[in-house]
């Protein structure tokens, strides 16, 4: 059991059976488990939300006698908090009908063309009040935090008009004030062209740039912009212009790339996007382009599980030298499960990823996908976002494929 201490002074947390720091790992390329730093009987000092020092618990206790002890009295393994760098968890309604249709033989694209898919979520999200959206969003955030996820990227993209896109982003802003988790909002108004927009895809993207993004910037609702490049969404040519113009306005950019057809990763790399996400259809050219760039390859196993399709080629991406992050894509349609750890463990088994590669993809490399370089690693000066699992062997975490959950989670050094 743990004796919780709510103080702003320096405190020593431990001892832990093992502490996995995730430090000293390269951001790009394949990893071996031998590269993981594992501190046996470790502890860490925390002050003002930051890690002061990390190492052997007895050594820290002897050298910092003034620190208040937050004692761990059972076998526990400590890791950095997970970072989910791609979600759509602000939405109204459900898409269970889509799921049933898909399992009965309809494809994702067929459902979208028939009026289901993203458009049905748009209609339900538009109909939801800000209060209803907030309640649903906070419940999903709470579930993520209990699962050890302390930083969560959240996209708009189910509004697709001025009022509803702003309603989503303002709801995310309201939620950020009611949770200790870090929320990273992203404008995904370029999800699809809404059916009620009078004009073509080029005109719609131009509306986002000229009308919507200035309001978002003025209200400080997001500093990231995403675009879905696909047959049912936007072309590479239009998206390239859109991304470059959004970047010129001061927004970081990311791309829904190569989900069903290859090629859009090349656009992401060419536009210097911070990440290219999905990648299920990526081939040799796309993988090599990512490896030669600073764009993070974010794979989304939840979408593959939800759609019943193959995973992104994570093994090939890593072997080519890419920085691979793993995110949930939690959304009401193609990825409704939302269990990031289970998804990552299953991806690791299917793609033959080492434990180090999976854990890095959920922590330090996921942090880099959001360009948040103050977390995802347990090291001096880093944000004290932590999670502890009731085991004495870190290998049990992925071995249990999501069934073993953290029983302690800290954000900024406070047990939540």
Image (cartoon, rainbow, N blue to C red):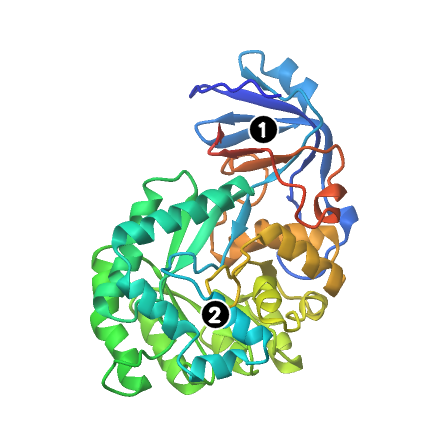
Q: Which residue occupies the extreme top position in the image?
A: 65
Q: Which residue is mark 2?
A: 97
Residue at figure coordinates x 49%, y 44% from the top left? 143
Q: Position of residue 241 (x, y in %)?
A: 36, 81
Residue at figure coordinates x 38%, y 50% from the top left? 136
Q: Which residue occupies the extreme right position in the image?
A: 34
Secondary structure of the residue carrying tag 1 is strand
Q: Can the viewer see residue 114? A: yes
Q: Is 200 above or below relative to 34? A: below
Q: Position of residue 41 (x, y in %)?
A: 72, 26
Dot 1: few (<14), some (14–19), or many (≥20) neighbours within 10 Å?
some
Camera-side mark, 1 or 2 = 2
Q: Which residue is mark 1?
A: 53
Foreground of the two, 190 or 65? 190
Q: Position of residue 273 (x, y in %)?
A: 46, 69
Secondary structure of the residue carrying tag 2 is helix
In the image, is 331 to the left or to the right of 73? left
């Amino acid at each position: 059991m743990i004796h919780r201490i709510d103080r702003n002074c320096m405190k020593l947390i431990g001892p832990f059976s093992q502490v996995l720091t995730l430090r000293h790992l390269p951001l790009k390329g394949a990893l071996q488990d031998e590269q993981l730093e594992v501190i046996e009987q470790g502890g860490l000092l925390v002050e003002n939300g930051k890690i002061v020092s990390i190492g052997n618990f007895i050594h820290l206790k002897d050298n910092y006698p003034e620190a208040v002890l937050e004692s761990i009295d059972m076998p526990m393994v400590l890791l950095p908090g997970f970072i989910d760098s791609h979600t759509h968890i602000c939405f109204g309604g459900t898409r269970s009908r889509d799921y049933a249709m898909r399992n009965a033989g309809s494809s994702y694209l067929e459902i979208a063309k028939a009026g289901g898919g993203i458009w049905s979520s748009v209609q339900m999200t538009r109909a939801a009040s800000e209060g209803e959206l907030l309640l649903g969003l906070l419940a999903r955030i709470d579930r993520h935090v209990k699962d050890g996820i302390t930083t969560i990227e959240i996209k708009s993209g189910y509004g697709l008009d001025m009022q509803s896109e702003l309603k989503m982003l303002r709801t995310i802003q309201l939620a950020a004030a009611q949770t200790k988790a870090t929320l990273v909002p992203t404008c995904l108004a370029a999800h699809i062209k809404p059916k009620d927009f009078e004009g073509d895809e080029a005109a719609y993207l131009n509306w986002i740039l000229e009308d919507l993004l200035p309001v978002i910037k003025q209200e400080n609702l997001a500093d990231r912009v995403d675009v879905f490049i696909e047959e049912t969404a936007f072309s590479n040519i239009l998206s390239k212009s859109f991304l470059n113009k959004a970047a010129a306005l001061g927004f970081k950019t990311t791309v829904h790339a190569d989900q069903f057809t290859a090629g859009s990763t090349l656009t992401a790399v060419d536009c210097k996007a911070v990440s290219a996400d999905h990648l299920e259809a990526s081939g040799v050219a796309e993988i090599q382009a990512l490896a030669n760039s600073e764009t993070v390859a974010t794979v989304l196993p939840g979408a593959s599980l939800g759609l019943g399709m193959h995973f992104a080629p994570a093994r090939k991406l890593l072997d080519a030298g890419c920085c691979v992050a793993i995110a949930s894509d939690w959304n009401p349609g193609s990825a409704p499960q939302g269990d990031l750890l289970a998804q990552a463990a299953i991806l690791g088994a299917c793609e033959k990823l080492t434990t180090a590669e999976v854990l890095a993809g959920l922590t330090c490399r996921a942090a880099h996908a959001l360009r948040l370089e103050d977390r995802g690693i347990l090291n001096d000066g880093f944000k004290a976002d932590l999670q502890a699992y009731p085991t004495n062997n870190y290998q049990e975490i992925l071995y249990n494929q999501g069934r073993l959950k953290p029983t302690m989670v800290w954000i900024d050094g406070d047990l939540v």
